[in-house]
Image: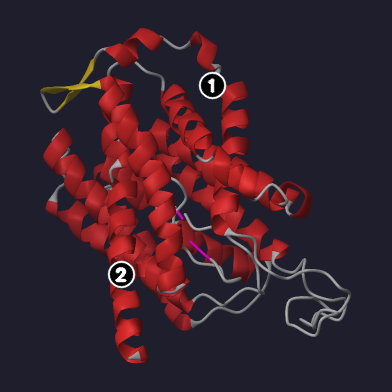
Amino acid sequence: MHASRGTQKRSAGLGLALLSAFAFGGSGVAAKPLIEAGLDPLHVVWLRVAGAALIMLPVAWRHRNLVRERPALLAAFGLFAVAGVQACYFAAISRIPVGVALLVEYLAPALVLGWVRFVQRRPVTRAAALGVVLAVGGLACVVEVWAGLSFDALGLLLALGAACCQVGYFVLSDHGGQEGKGRDGREGKGRDGREGKGGDGGSIEPPPPLGVIAYGLIVGALVLTVVARPWGMDWSLLGGTAGMNGTGVPAWVLLGWIVLIATVLAYGTGVVSVRMLSPQVAGVVACLEAVIATVLAWVLLGEHLSAPQLIGGFVVLTGAFIAQSSAPKPPSGPVAAGAGAAAAATEGELSAGRAAH
């Protein structure tokens, strides 16, 4: 009976993880026609984040204690995983193909390992180093270095900036994970005798991921409001159509997809899938996001990649998978799912997932 329930739970979790990857993968495909129709990339990002933040307000109110308990984590998630990643990613896809931008962003797991090895001076396994080499080599094929970088250099730098924003959030989360440990570095018991308090009485219970996401979106919306200045946006464009490979699509439909499907649904299903599977398994499924985005861009936007680029993309994802699977586990620390994937982590573990694409 228990085995059957476990199998059903894993199957349901896998289905939700696939749905999350599909939802995240479609964000760039829906956003690019809006950008090409005349909307500034920052305005598209602001519409996405502000719209999702409004929908998630009830969740934020339910977890309002997080503002007092985890202000640094919420600020980091909003600044890096929401505002930083999305602004860089949407700006990148305005200049380079969606699939290429997302594959560049999948260097994040490799960059995290670089931080661990050379900044924190912690050892990494040979398998992890191999993953980094594969990811970098695959990226060289994706951008076709032998052709002198046939893609827009600024677009590639923006995509790399999105990857760095993911790294910044992962690193901050790693440090934040030590907040709940006691002064002796051990996880002790609370006054009631249950696990969950450090030796000095500090809480180590990870915050609810949906609460972190809700406040991250709010913080991201506030930051992007200052940067994007939406009051100068041409709102009339949202009442028109955007071209998707020669086919006119109502702009409000694309915006609705970005807000409801590629943000709210994507995050929600991603969080639930991590709880039903594990951060590691969910992270592997999240790698399909790049594949889904590339296929959707190929079919819906006509962005065709060459054979070497497709092979390079496969190598990038393989390297990212090896790197995240072989990465040393950080101290128990709270990271919200989503950078990519993301990115997804819960139960106090770091996952090289996604961040709000």
The residue at the point 38 percent across, 60 percent down is 136
Q: Amino acid under label 2?
A: Ala
Query: Which residues fall within the magenta stretch?
Result: 341-345
Q: In this image, 304 relative to 185: left or right?
A: left
Q: Amino acid under label 1?
A: Ala
The residue at the point 33 percent across, 76 percent down is 10
Residue at image mark 2 = 12
Q: Main secondary structure of the magenta part?
A: loop
The residue at the point 46 percent across, 60 percent down is 271
Specify few, some or many for label 1: CA neighbours under 10 Å numbering under 14, 14-19, or 20 or more: many
In which quadrant will I find the C terminus? Answer: top left
- Where is 182 relative to 113, above or below? below
From the viewer's perspective, is the residue at label 2 or at label 1 nearer? 2
The label shown at residue 228 is: 1
Q: Earlier in the sequence, mark 2 or mark 1?
A: 2
Element assignment for label 2:
helix
- Where is 251 relative to 176, above or below? above
Query: Is 146 or 331 nearer to us in this picture?
Result: 331
Taking the image as drawn, is residue 324 in sight?
no
Q: In this image, 183 relative to 274: left or right?
A: right
Taking the image as drawn, is residue 46 in sight?
yes
Membership of 143 in magenta stretch: no
Query: Is 342 or 328 nearer to us in this picture?
Result: 342
Query: Is 159 or 13 nearer to us in this picture?
Result: 13
Specify few, some or many for label 2: CA neighbours under 10 Å numbering under 14, 14-19, or 20 or more: some
Element assignment for label 1:
helix
Q: In this image, 178 relative to 112: left or right?
A: right
> Which residue of the protein is positioned furthest toward the front in this rendering?
1
The image quadrant that residue 135 belongs to is bottom left
- Where is 57 relative to 255, above or below? below
Image spot of residue 104 (x, y percent): 38, 50
